[in-house]
Amino acid sequence: MKIQILGTGCAKCKQLTENAEAAAREMGIAYEIEKVSDIVEIVKYGVMATPALAVDGKVKLVGKVATPAEIRVLLS
Amino acid sequence: MKITPKCGCNGGPDLMFCCSGAADTAEIADQAVRTLHRAKEAKMFCLAGIAGEVELIVMNTQAANRMLVVDGCDSDCAKKTMEKNGFGDFVHFRVTDLGWEKGKTPVSGERVAEAAARLRQLLSGAPARADA
């Protein structure tokens, strides 16, 4: 599973990355984190606010830092 | 229009939704919203996407900093559409509240400009949404 974190690298983006990694570890799934920080690339996902999270290219979360528990739901 | 994502550290985008209905007052509403959109004062977003529960449109809307919902008459179709889909924390405006009567108000540049000025005023006074 590829988890993509869309954001230009602010504190919220970093927190979302940490929470996503924690969620994936807790679930025991094979995962890969990809940080998408290029604004041109982020635009291609259609998100209007960052941080955002996509799973295998599909946007699951926009404009907020989800908790590990919330992310587990998005990953399942 | 190119969409530039806004960093969540500073809140999401300001979004506008309009009934864009068939009546003359709805056309004025639509043109006024587009006036602000073109001036990049806020982004016009798709009400049909909310009604159709288009996932990405709903997610982007949930991340909005401020929301302005505009109707052309007191049928309040845009307001009801937003509320039916779980959005309640927006500023609402009816173009007929400017004293114009639906079906008897031909669209003109002056009327569009007057409505746009009112929308601009409402947007600037709108509070940020709690979950933005």
Image: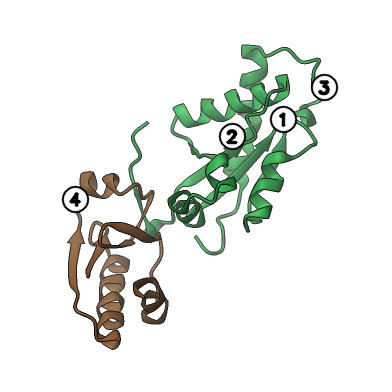
Chain colours: A brown, B green
Dot 1 or dot 3, earlier in sequence: 1
x and y, in percent, of residue A60 in the image? 38, 62
Secondary structure type for disc 2: helix
Q: Position of residue B80 (x, y in %)?
A: 71, 47
Q: Which chain carries label 3?
A: B
Q: Earlier in the sequence, mark 2 or mark 3?
A: 3
- Please tell me whether mark 4 sits on a helix, a strand or a loop: loop
Residues tagged by mark 2 and mark 3 found on one chain of the structure: yes
Separation of disc 1 and disc 2 at Cα?
16 Å
Amino acid type assigned to the residue bearing label 3 in the image: Glu
* Residue beneath disc 4: A38
User: Mark 2 and mark 3: span between their CA atoms?
Assistant: 22 Å
Q: Which amino acid does label 1 sit on?
A: Gly
Is residue B4 found left or right of B69 in the rendered image?
left
Mark 2 residue crowding within 10 angstroms, few (<14) / some (14–19) / many (20+): some
For residue B101, which numbered disc appears in the image?
Answer: 3
Residue identified by numbered label 2: B120
The answer to whether mark 4 and mark 2 are in CB contact below 8 A is no
CB contact under 8 Å: marks 3 and 4:
no
Q: Residue at x 27, y 45 (%)?
A: A44
Amino acid bearing label 4 = Asp
Chain of the residue displaying label 1: B
Would you say the residues marked 1 and 2 are in contact, meaning their CB atoms lie under 8 Å apart? no
Q: In which quarter of the image is residue B23?
A: top right
Amino acid bearing label 2: Arg
